[in-house]
Image: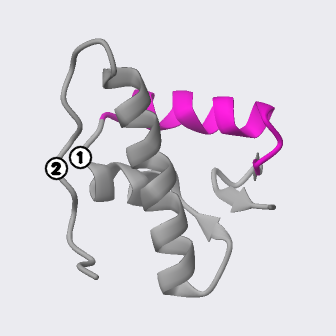
Amino acid sequence: MSLGPVSPPVNGPVGPLERGLAVLCELTRLAAHRGEAAVRPGDLVRGTGLARSVVDLVARAVSSWCMCELDIGDHMLLTG
């Protein structure tokens, strides 16, 4: 498995889905690689090549689904 950044998903009708999946994949990859559940949004930005606003949007959506938590220290914590 490569630990380098992935290319950003394309735009189009499925672009939002692909961007969301890219953030989720990077979140789980980083958490598994580090052996800890906390991941900084900046690491997700670097890993996906997406804008911070996209990463924040996905983080808020996933948090609302109770799959992760956002803490005060600007980390995403996997809870599932």
**Residue at mark 2:** 7
Quick one: SS at disc 1?
A: loop
Residue contact between numbered discs 1 and 2, judged by CB atoms under 8 Å: yes
Quadrant containing the C terminus in the rendered view? bottom right
Let me know if residue 56 is in the magenta part: yes
Residue 13 found in image quarter: top left
Q: Position of residue 55 (x, y in %)?
A: 46, 38
Between 51 and 30, which is closer to the camera in this rendering? 30
Horizontal side of 54 relative to 58 (left or right) equals: left
**Residue at mark 1:** 49
Indicate the amino acid at tag 1.
Gly
Find residue 24 and name its label: none
Mark 1 neighbour class, 10 Å CA radius: few under 14, some 14 to 19, many 20 or more: some
The residue shown at (78%, 31%) is 64
Q: Position of residue 79 (x, y in %)?
A: 81, 61
Position of 20 relative to 33 (above/below):
above
Between 25 and 52, which is closer to the camera in this rendering? 25
Colour scheme shown: one colour
Q: Earlier in the sequence, mark 1 or mark 2?
A: 2
The residue shown at (20%, 72%) is 4
Horizontal side of 3 relative to 80 (left or right) equals: left
Please provide the residue range marked out in magenta.
51-68
Mark 2 neighbour class, 10 Å CA radius: few under 14, some 14 to 19, many 20 or more: few
Q: Position of residue 44 (x, y in %)?
A: 41, 54
Let me know if residue 72 is in the magenta part: no
Residue 63 found in image quarter: top right
The residue shown at (72%, 60%) is 77
